[in-house]
Amino acid sequence: MTATPPARPAAPARTPTDRLLAALGGLVSGYGGLAVAALVAVLVRPEAGPVAAVGDWAVDRSPAGVKEWAIRTFGENDKAVLETGIMVVLAVLAALIGLLALRSLPAAVTAVAALGLAGVLAAVTRPDSTSAADALPSLAGAAVAAALLYVLTGRLTRPRPAAPVPDRRGFLLTGAGVVAGATGALVLSRTVGATRSENASASREALRLPRPASPAPAVPPGAQLPVDGISPFITPNGDFYRVDTALVVPRLDATAWKLRVHGMGVPRERVFTLPELLRREVVERDVTLACVSNEVGGPYVGNARWLGVRLADLLRECGVRPPSRGGPADQLVARSADGMTIGSPVETVMDGRDALLAFGMNGEPLPFAHGFPVRMVVPGLYGYVSACKWITSIELTTFAAYDAYWVPRGWAAQAPVKTESRIDTPKAFSKIAAGPRPVAVAGVAWAQHRGISRVEVRIDDGPWHDAELGAADSADTWRQWVHRWHPTPGHHTLTVRATDGTGAVQTEQRADTMPDGATGWHSVEVTAG
Ligand SMILES: Nc1nc2c(c(=O)[nH]1)N[C@H]1C(S)=C(S)[C@@H](COP(=O)(O)O)O[C@H]1N2
Ligand SMILES: [Mo]
C-alpha cells in the first residue's frame, strides 16, 4: 500500500485558454510599458523613446545596401515601415514573454529587463544623446511592463484562496484597466508632444523672411517648357524629395536655435542666433539639390529657390581661411540637432559659389522636414556632403582627422555632383500613339555649378538628336529639355545624355550610387501603336 503524498496546492491547470490569456497578458504589459516609455520620452526627449531609439540604431547599423533597398522599396514611407516592423517584433516578443511568464515569472521578467536594456543602450549611444536622462524612457517602460506582467500573470497562476482556479475574470478586468490607463498615457504623451511642437510651429509661423539684399533674378519664362509630365522647373516644397536618417522629424524652436562656429583655424569662435542671421546680407538663389543615392533616372533631385546668408562671409568673419589661403582646415563638419555629421571641403564652400545657410525655401520658412530653422545648401555637392538640415554647429577640421557620418559606411568623403539627365516623359513601358502628332520626349538635366550646355536624345540605335533646351536659369540649377519625336509603330528605346558647361559629355559608363554617385545614361522603353 502506498502512502498518499502529502497534500500540496494543486498546480493551476494550464489550459489553452490560459496560454492564450498569458500571451494576451504579455501584449497588454508590453503596451502599458511602451505607453509609459512614450510619456517619459516626451518629457525627456522624443528621440530617446525606445522605438525611435532602436529604429535609429537599426538605421545607423544597417549596411548601406539595406538602406538603399529600403529607400527604393518603401520610398518616403521607409521610416514608417521600419517603425511598424519594430512594433510587430515587439508584439511577438511580448506575447512570447507572456507565455514564458506562465512557466517562470523570473525568466519572463529577465526577458523584459533585457528588452529594456536594449532600449537604454540604443538611446544613450545615439550620436545626439548628450544626457543619461535618455535612458529613462526605456527604464521606466521596462519597469512598468515587468510590474504589469507580474500582476496579470499572477491572476492566472496564483489564484486567490477563495477561487482556487485561474482568476480569469480578475485577469480580464485588470487587463482592461491597464489598456485604458496605457491609452490615457499615450494620449497624454501625444498632447504634451503636440504642445512642444506647437512652440516650434509657432516659431516657424512667427518667422518673417527678410527681403533679400541680393535677390535671385526672376526665373526666365522659357525655363519652364510647356510639356505635360515634365518635372516643374521649381519643385514645390510638398513634392521636394526627402532623404535623411531621422525617424522623428526634429521640430526645433527657432527662438532657441543657435549655430556655433569653432575648430581648427577659427581665431574668432562665434555663436549665431537666427535674428543675427536675418540681420545679415540676405541672398536668394535657385539651387538644384541632388542625393548621392539617386539611381540613374531616379527621383531624389529637386530644385528650389533658397533664401539665406552666405556661408563663406560668415566663416571669414570668424577668421577662417581656405587651404589655398593658408588655412589649416580642409574640412567643414556640420552637425545637426539629430546627430548627423556632414563634411564639406572648406575650399569649395569658400570658392565664391553661393554656399548658403538657408532659412527660406520657395518663399516660406524651411519646412520642418527640410531642416527648419536653418540648413546648408552648397551648389554642386551631393546632399550628404553639404546640405545639413537642422544644423547646430560647424566645426573646422581636416579630412584626415575626421570621417563624417556616411564615410565609414562606405561613401566617399568628397562628392561633387555628377552630370546627369532624366527622361520624365514618356514613362517607362508606356504605350504611346503613333500618328501625325509628335510625342514630346522630355525631362531634366543637371550638373550643378557647371551648368548644362546641351542635351541629346537617341531613339533605339539611331543618331543623337539635339533636344530643345529650356532657358538656363543659373549654372546651379537643372535645365529642362524636350525632343519632339514622330514614332513609328513598335517597341522603342529612348536614351538621353547631357553635356555640362565645361563641354564634358555625360558618361555612358554605368556606376553604382555607392561610393560617390551613379552614372550612366537614362533609357526608357516605350511602345508606339
Ligand atoms: N540632419 C540631416 N541633414 C541631412 C541629411 C540627414 O540625414 N540628416 N541627409 C542629407 C542628404 S543625404 C540629402 S540628399 C539632403 C536631402 O535634403 P532634403 O531632404 O531637404 O531633400 O539632406 C542632407 N542633410
Ligand atoms: Mo543624399
Image (cartoon, rainbow, N blue to C red):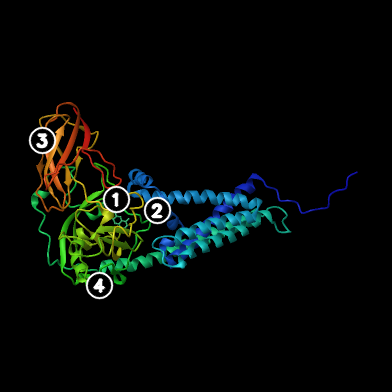
Image quadrant where residue 68 sits: top left
Counting residues from the start of the chain, the first of labels 1 and 4 encountered is 4
Q: Which of marks 2 and 3 is nearer the N terminus?
A: 2
* Amino acid type at mark 2: Asp
Marking on residue 465: 3
Q: Residue at x 34, y 56 (%)?
A: 405
Image height check: is 140 above or below 101? below
Residue at image mark 1: 412
Q: Where is residue 528 in the image (x, y as percent from the top left)?
A: 18, 29
In-front residue for pair 378/434:
378
Residue 203 image-quadrant placement: bottom left
| The C terminus sits in image quarter | top left
Instruction: State how far apart marks 1 and 2 are (Cα).
Output: 17 Å
Circle 3 SS class: strand
Q: Do the residues labelled 1 and 2 touch (CB within 8 Å)?
A: no
From the viewer's side, name the closer residue of 225 and 421.
421
CB of mark 3 near ligand 1 (< 8 Å): no
Q: Is mark 1 on a helix, strand or loop?
A: loop
Q: Which residue lies furthest to the front in this view?
A: 326
Query: Secondary structure under badge 4?
Result: loop
**Is ligand 1 closer than 8 angstroms to the Cβ of mark 2?**
no
Q: Residue furthest right?
A: 1
Dot in front, 1 or 4: 4
Residue 305 screen position, x and y as percent: 18, 57
Q: In this figure, which residue is indicated by the disc labeled 2?
A: 60
Q: Which of marks 4 and 3 is in front?
A: 4
First along the sequence among labels 1 and 3 = 1
Q: What residue type is labelled 4?
A: Pro
Residue identifier under label 4? 267
Mark 2 falls on what kind of element? helix
Residue closer to the observer: 458 or 1:
458
